[in-house]
Amino acid sequence: MSETVQDSTGARVSVEHDEQNSAFVVRVDSGEVAGRAHYLAGPGSGAESGAGSERIMYHTEVGEEFLGRGLAKILVSHALKTSSDTMVTVVPVCPLFAERLKEHGNDFLAIGGRYRWATEADVEFVKQNI
């Protein structure tokens, strides 16, 4: 599923969920990848687990040439909305996701989103699996 939105400059960008590579991807109009929000499926979150699975968001990056356009915020918002829509619990290891949920966690819960704070075990799981 791909969504087209405007960045902070008014330019159109598309955001998609790249399930094969466990990332959310933002592209500029030319199709060039401008950034990614990477995740790992939490332990026990295989395809068969369906609702109740976890998505450990561990790293968000935007290319230097695209900074200042609000693309990281767009990635985080899209990933949270997609996770909410699919009933996946978000585990924010990435500081951008953690900050967003600290500021807007109640809003995320209000739209049916689910999250839990990362533990040391989650951080260790990321270190062992990336």
Image: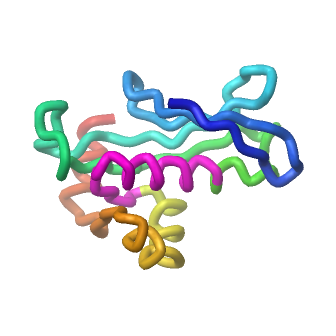
Q: Residue at x 29, y 45 (%)?
A: 126
In front: 38, or 24?
24
State the quadrant of the C terminus.
top left
In the rendered image of this protein, does residue 95 appear above or below residue 20? Answer: below
In the rendered image of this protein, does residue 124 appear above or below residue 41? Answer: below
Where is residue 129 drawn, in percent x and y?
26, 36
Where is residue 125 drawn, in percent x and y?
22, 47
Side of 104 relative to 43 (left or right)? right
Q: Indicate whether residue 76 is drawn in magenta.
A: yes
In front: 4, or 17?
4
Side of 94 relative to 74 (left or right)? left
Query: Which quarter of the picture shows residue 45?
Result: top left
Where is residue 122 drawn, in percent x and y?
24, 55
In front: 108, or 37?
108
Q: Indicate whether residue 86 is drawn in magenta.
A: yes
Q: Residue at x 12, y 32 (%)?
A: 48
Magenta stretch, residue numbers: 74-93
